[in-house]
Image: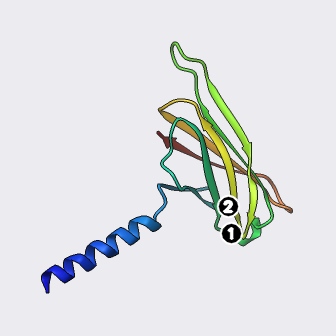
């Protein structure tokens, strides 16, 4: 009986891990909650990021993402921008290029059909 319970537990744990995304981060501003999701672990190079907006009023917004790393001694500043593709229902997808390991600053720009442009800031560590 104990063996059956162990097998069931391992099977459920494995199924749960398969459903989880490799990277997920929530960022908020006064106006909106944004969830960044990547199916694969973030790595140096191109990364596909899903951007999910929690509020229905941003359903048909224009969304873009900017990633940057400030200049440091012996290294220039690095920056990349991408316009996100609308997937529907407040979900968007964008490609971002993280050209080296370290902490990247992220700014997500949301321009709704009506109202002012919103910026949500967060950071990524790879």
At a point 20% along the width and 76% down the height, the residue shown is 6
Q: Residue 49 placed where, x, y %?
A: 61, 51
Answer left or right for 57 relative to 29.
right
At a point 79% along the width and 60% down the height, the residue shown is 61
Q: Residue 71 placed where, x, y %?
A: 57, 21
Q: Mark 2 points at which residue?
A: 31
Answer left or right for 101 relative to 83.
left
**In-front residue for pair 116/89:** 89
Count neighbours of disc 1 (C-alpha within 10 A) and say few if under 14, some if 14 to 19, many if 20 or more: few
Q: Are marks 1 and 2 in contact (CB under 8 Å)?
A: yes
At a point 70% along the width and 58% down the height, the residue shown is 92
Check the image and report above or below for 111 versus 55: above
**In-front residue for pair 79/87:** 87
Answer left or right for 97 relative to 123.
right
**In-front residue for pair 18/108:** 18
Q: Name the residue under label 1.
A: 55
Answer with the quarter of the image where residue 112 lies. Answer: bottom right
Local SS, label 1: loop
Answer with the quarter of the image where residue 111 lies. Answer: bottom right
């Amino acid at each position: 009986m104990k063996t059956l319970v162990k097998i069931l537990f391992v099977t459920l744990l494995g199924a749960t891990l398969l459903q989880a995304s490799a990277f997920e981060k929530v960022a908020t501003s006064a106006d909106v909650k944004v969830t960044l999701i990547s199916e694969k672990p973030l790595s140096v190079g191109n990364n596909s990021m899903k951007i999910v907006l929690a509020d229905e009023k941003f359903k048909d917004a224009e969304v873009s993402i900017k990633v940057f790393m400030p200049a440091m001694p012996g290294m220039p500043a690095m920056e990349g921008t991408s316009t996100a593709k609308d997937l529907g229902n407040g979900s968007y997808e964008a490609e971002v290029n993280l050209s080296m390991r370290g902490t990247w600053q992220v700014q997500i720009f949301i321009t709704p059909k009506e109202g002012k442009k919103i910026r949500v800031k967060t950071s990524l560590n790879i």
